Amino acid sequence: MSSRNQLTDAMAELLWERGYAATSPREVMARAGVGQGSMYHHFSGKHDLAVEVMSAVIGDMTGKSSLLAGEGSPLQRIKNHLTEPRPGTRGCRVGRMTQDPQVVADAELLGIVSKAFDTMLGRWEATIAEAVGAGELPASTVPSELARTLAAVIQGGYVLARAKGDQGPMDAAIRGAVGLLDAAHAAVDADHTTQRRRQ
């Protein structure tokens, strides 16, 4: 592995473990097992390294989304995405950055985080709109609002899991969201059945 890759891998780990503000260039070099010469040969400093790492991590995460390209109906894709394994106690790689004061104060870093959420919310909205169009969710569903509700469930699940030091709250939050979607779908089916009986 090249020294550049060692540095980016080390930074990715430390950002997830400690956040940007609490990670020093010295700690990154120590974790990577490289010297100062290698660090500053590849990057101008901690900020430059963080920009590359955050962009790569977020690009990888958003690129793997099963919402648009997954199998099954739109509603099933939404449920599949919700129930993908998430290490609740480790927190969300992206969401945790919004709690880092130095990230929030840095327009470039915050822009990377904001763009990641915009990308995911756009995918949620598109898939929810598909589910509404397919008659799987009520016609009254507002895709932009439900997208943000589901994103909030996931982020809140991380917060609750970290607060308890236990995966249980994350799993419970996801089950609750899936249960609400199933109830909404059942209500649509019941309405369709009632309409057919009246015809």
Image (cartoon, helix red, strand yellow):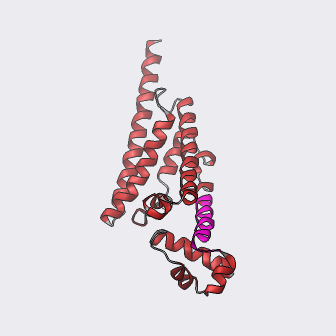
- Most prominent secondary structure in the magenta stretch? helix
Q: How many marks?
A: 0
Q: Name the residue rendered at 40%, 49% in the picture.
A: 153
For the residue pair 122 and 25, the one nearer the viewer reads as 25
Indicate the quadrant where residue 44 lies.
bottom right
- How far across and how far down the image is residue 4, in percent? 67, 78
Q: Is residue 145 left or right of residue 133?
A: left
Can the viewer see residue 3 in this picture?
yes
Q: Name the residue rendered at 55%, 56% in the picture.
A: 107
- How far across and how far down the image is residue 8, in percent? 61, 74
For the residue pair 183 and 40, the one nearer the viewer reads as 40
Q: Is residue 32 above or below residue 190?
A: below
Indicate the quadrant where residue 17 lies.
bottom left
Instruction: Judge whether residue 59 is colored magenta.
Output: yes
Residue, far top: 199
Can the viewer see residue 1 in this picture?
no
- How far across and how far down the image is residue 71, in percent? 60, 47
Q: Name the residue rendered at 48%, 74% in the picture.
A: 23
Instruction: Judge whether residue 65 is colored magenta.
Output: no
Q: Name the residue rendered at 50%, 62% in the picture.
A: 103
Q: Is residue 166 above or below residue 5?
A: above
- How far across and how far down the image is residue 39, in percent? 63, 81
For the residue pair 180 and 142, the one nearer the viewer reads as 142
The magenta segment is 44-60
